[in-house]
């Protein structure tokens, strides 16, 4: 699904001391499975995810998604790609504070028909929310409930790829385990990429990518 060739991300390009967030490497990722990207702060793991998801454009190198060079397509096409085929989960849930949990899911949906409403409710149930929680605003939900609602929002359009950047960092162990269990189940048919510095939540990944100083230091679970 993803083919990365000689990718680099360089900050402070106009200074003598350039900072390499990504230092030039190749990477291939399949069309399904749970992929963990781990490393210390500043290792480049989030930058790699942002380049794969078109949220950032690498300084050098190429990123191909299903044969399409996504670093070269126009901004509007990148926006359409993200909306139709990608889902995002971040450390903060970014739910709209004046909307209910259910409306937060529906606002991200590609349509607003009755079937979509029922699908949103089923997703919230799968995430462990009760029907009485559907109409609650984020301030009335727990942190774990908000994060699970954010995952439901990411899944509402059946994206081919889920990008999750530190999705469990603000949660307790029980909620973190439950979220990873949900993402693992989804990865049986789709690609899920989880970026985290916490290796303990990546015990059930199919591919483990370890990063250090902007480069891949090790890959396990994949033929390189």
Image (tube, grey):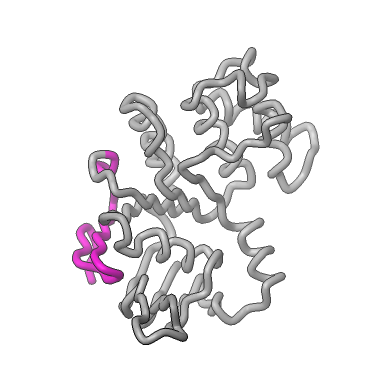
> Quick one: 131 or 116, which is closer to the camera?
131
Most extreme residue toward the front, as rendered?
16
Q: Tell me the magenta residue range.
A: 201-224
Residue at x-position 40% and y-position 53%: 193
Q: Quadrant of the C terminus?
A: bottom left
Quadrant of residue 37 within the rendered picture: bottom left
Residue at x-position 41% and y-position 76%: 9
Residue 165 horizontal/vertical position (percent): 43, 50
Q: Quadrant of the N terminus?
A: bottom left
Residue at x-position 56% and y-position 37%: 150
Judge whether residue 208 is colored magenta.
yes
- Where 146 falls versus 32 (above or below)? above
Residue 27 horizontal/vertical position (percent): 33, 72
Specify whether 174 is left or right of 164: left
> Quick one: 64 or 18, which is closer to the camera?
18
Residue at x-position 43% and y-position 42%: 167
């Amino acid at each position: 699904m993803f083919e990365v060739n000689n990718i680099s991300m360089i900050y402070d390009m106009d200074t003598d001391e350039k900072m390499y967030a990504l230092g030039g490497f190749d990477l291939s990722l399949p069309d399904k499975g749970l992929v963990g990207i781990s490393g210390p702060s500043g290792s480049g793991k989030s930058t790699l995810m942002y380049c794969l998801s078109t949220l950032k454009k690498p300084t050098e190198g190429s990123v191909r998604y299903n044969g399409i060079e996504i670093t070269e397509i126009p901004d509007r096409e990148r926006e359409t790609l993200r909306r139709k085929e990608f889902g995002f989960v971040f450390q903060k849930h970014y739910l709209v504070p004046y909307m209910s949990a259910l409306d937060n899911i529906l606002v991200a949906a590609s349509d607003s028909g009755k079937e979509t409403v029922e699908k949103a409710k089923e997703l919230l149930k799968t995430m462990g929310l009760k029907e009485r929680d559907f109409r609650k605003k984020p301030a009335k939900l727990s942190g774990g409930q908000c994060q699970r609602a954010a995952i439901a929002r990411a899944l509402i359009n059946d994206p081919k790829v889920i990008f999750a950047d530190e999705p469990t960092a603000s949660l307790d162990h029980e909620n973190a385990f439950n979220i990873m269990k949900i993402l693992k189940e989804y990865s049986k048919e789709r690609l899920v990429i989880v970026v985290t510095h916490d290796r303990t939540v990546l015990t059930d990944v199919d591919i483990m990518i370890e990063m250090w100083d902007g480069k891949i230091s090790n890959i396990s679970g994949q033929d390189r």
